[in-house]
Structure formats: structure tokens, C-alpha cells
Amino acid sequence: MIETRVRIVTMDYGIAWVEPTEQSGCGGCQAKSACGVSGLGKYFSRRQRPVPVFCKTPAKAGDELLVAVNESELLKAGLLVYLLPTVLAIAGASLAALKGWGDAGAVAGMALGIAAGLLLARFIGRAPYLKARPLSHSIAQGETP
């Protein structure tokens, strides 16, 4: 699980609108830009508006939550968004080349493949499920769990 701390901005009908409270990841190594641990924090930090998260526990604005996402769901979403358009682009360019449509046809086939892959990923994909739970008192004070 990849986790990050967030603060509730508003709460509406079991949906908590949250924003990050801290920068995730240690930032201490050279791999921090590709680090999976800080990935969820980067997702929240790029957002200008609050992000909706389903929250089962009673909470109010100002409370802090620990939001987690499963790595396998993140991997599936990434494969769908990046791999599907790439495969369809190669298939489109290959089909155009096999039909003898030349370089312009191959480029057009590749563009159509990318567009089809992105549209297909948009319609069949879903956002990874974010799980929220209250932040325990010891974590809120800066102690390690």
C-alpha cells in the first residue's frame, strides 16, 4: 500500500474532499523522482483542487486522514493508460504498412491507434480506489507507527 496524509477540506454525504498535509517521500535519494513511495503524494501535490475520497468513518473539516492505494491497482491503471495506446499505435502503423499505404499512411494509422487507445482507456478504465482511515494520535504527533 502507498499511503499519504491528507486534511479534510469539506465533508459531503460520506465523501471527504481532501488536500495533502505534507510532502510525501523522504526526498533523500537520487531515485526520488521515480520512487513509488512518493507517487501518491505527487498525485495529491499536483492537484490545485481538493480530491474526493470515500470516507466510512465519521469525520469533519480539519481532521486528518491516512489515504492509501493498492500498488496493483496503480499498476493496472498505468498499464491501461500507457500500454494500450502504444500497442494500438504499433498495430495501426503496421496495418497501414501491410496495406502498402506508405509512410503517410503509417503515420495516420499510428495516430488513429493512439487516439483509439486513449479513448478506449478512458471508457473502460477507472480511477484506483483510495482507502481513507483516521490518522491515529501517535502518527499525528510525528511518531512512527
Image (tube, helix red, strand yellow):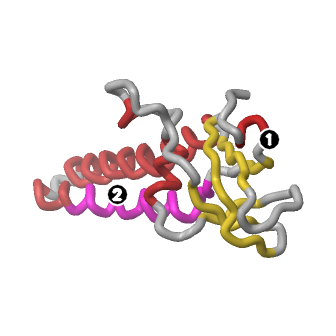
Which residue is at the front of the view, 80 or 72? 72
**Relative to 59, does residue 80 appear above or below in the rendering?**
above
Q: Image point 29% across, 51% down: which residue?
A: 95
What residue would you read off at disc 1?
137
With 6 as the anchor, is 45 left or right in this view?
left
For the residue labelled by badge 1, is the local secondary structure a helix, a strand or a loop?
Answer: helix
Q: Could you tell me residue 96's position as x and y percent?
A: 24, 54
Dividing the picture into quarters, in which one does residue 34 lie? top left
Contact between marks 2 and 1 (CB within 8 A): the answer is no
With 145 as the anchor, is 21 left or right in this view?
left
**Relative to 47, does residue 97 appear above or below in the rendering?**
above
What secondary structure prevails in the magenta region?
helix
Q: Could you tell me residue 137's position as x and y percent?
A: 79, 41
With 25 as the anchor, is 89 left or right in this view?
left
For the residue labelled by badge 2, is the local secondary structure a helix, a strand or a loop?
Answer: helix
> How far apart in space, not on screen, are marks 2 and 1 (Cα)?
51 Å
Q: Mark 2 packing: few (<14 Cα in 10 Å), some, or many (20+)?
A: many
What residue would you read off at disc 2?
113
Q: Amino acid at mark 2?
A: Gly
Q: Could you tell me residue 145's position as x and y percent?
A: 73, 28
| Quadrant showing the N terminus | top right
N-terminal-most mark, 2 or 1: 2
**Relative to 65, does residue 140 appear above or below in the rendering?**
above
Q: Amino acid at mark 1?
A: His
Q: Which range is magenta?
A: 108-127
Which residue is at the front of the view, 94 or 84? 84
Q: Is residue 119 magenta?
A: yes
Q: Mark 1 packing: few (<14 Cα in 10 Å), some, or many (20+)?
A: few
